[in-house]
Amino acid sequence: MKITEKITWVGKTDWELKKFHGDEFTTVNGSSYNSYLIRDKKTVLIDTAWLPYDKEFVSNLKKEIDLNKIDAVIALHGEIDHSGALTELMREMPENTPIYCTANGVKSIKGQYHKDWNFQIVKTGDKLELGESTLTFIEAPMLHWPDTMFAYMDKENVLFSSDGFGQHLASEFLYADEVDQDVLYAEALKYYANILAPFGMIATKKINDILAMNLPINMICPSHGLIWRKDPTQIVTKYLEWANNYQENQITIIYDTMWNDTRKMAEAIARGIQNKDKEVTVKILNTAKNDKTDVLTEVFKSKMILVGSPTVNNGYLHSIAGILEMIKGMKLKNKKAAAFGSYGWSGEAVKQITEYLKTSGFDVVNEGIRCMWTPDKDMEKELEEFGKGLV
Ligand code: FEO
């Protein structure tokens, strides 16, 4: 599909993708692996597609262009969802076709495919003359791999932003302004929260560096999802907001439960919060039943989280252990937290969760609340007061 006279989208829309990064990230709306063919005096291909689609990708590309006419491949990022078709592609292209990437890109691509292709290492500011247009490379390490870079094409004024500004969203359309904006932004936020959140400070600096270059930007072409065409920097503004210790007026209660006692605690605490503050959004999520990607997105949006588990075998339940590990990896700042949980005898879980939250960078507001056995009326009142106190 043509984007401009010189740029054609030659990617793969993956309608059936439901899990990404193994089973870590749910992609309920599918995704796309965006690849872009630029035809100027030189012809270059930006990125490929995920490995299972390698033959399909190359076969489709051959319908678009004689592979011998491609002067260079640009690998903005070595992750397999974008480099997966390289082996198949290079098998059919002249073996000395240059692959432009960062020094870390060579490491990640070689590390995965074990090939000595003709790598051409580029750094920020390096240029590739295409004819009428020029591509300028901008390293973007840790957004989200060390090898990531962006590329800016002048004259067309297009920023190829790799995973940045992307969404896992399969669509029959190419452009962000053509799809449901709520779905678009929900997926963009989910992507940011689950993949880029740990690198907020790096994202802010890189975005400000690019803004300082005063480049005219007509389009932002990410490597997943829709292309930002109408007011393209709207997503840049959103990223700056998300990267700045983002929070909404939301308290998220996450818990797991065996015989519903910790669930009853969660709901009583929620009642207390809601009775005290009608404005605050309270979300209650059972980590064993809810999608973990959505749980992390809700945590990202929150000003405070509460984490609850009963004590089992002197510890806490595995879904809580898993989600705590994922939350820790998000490296969130400026968020408050507290723990709660039921127990029958030893009751260590609340203290352990509290400690975990502290080491994960949360401002833990109290030592948490425990309930021995099932909450009775008095305990429910105490839990409601606990919720009010949090407000
Ligand atoms: Fe979409 Fe980090 O690869």
Image (cartoon, rainbow, N blue to C red):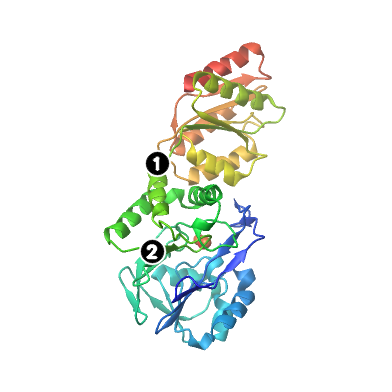
Which of the image's four quarters has the N terminus? Answer: bottom right
Q: In terms of secondary structure, where does tag 2 sit?
A: loop
For residue 10, above or below residue 278: below
Query: In the rendered structure, which amino acid carries the disc numbered 1?
Result: Asn
* Mark 2, residue position: 218
The answer to which quarter of the image holds residue 274 is top right
The residue depicted at 41 percent of the width and 63 percent of the height is 219
Name the side, left or right, on which 211 lies relative to 88: left
Residue 305 in view in this figure: no
Residue 245: image tag: 1
Q: In terms of secondary structure, where does tag 1 sit?
A: loop
Question: Sequence-wise, which precedes: disc 2 or disc 1?
Answer: 2
Query: In the rendered structure, which amino acid carries the disc numbered 2?
Result: Asn
Pick the residue in front: 86 or 188.
188
- Residue 357, given in percent of the width and then of the height, sits at 49, 35
Pick the residue in front: 104 or 161.
161
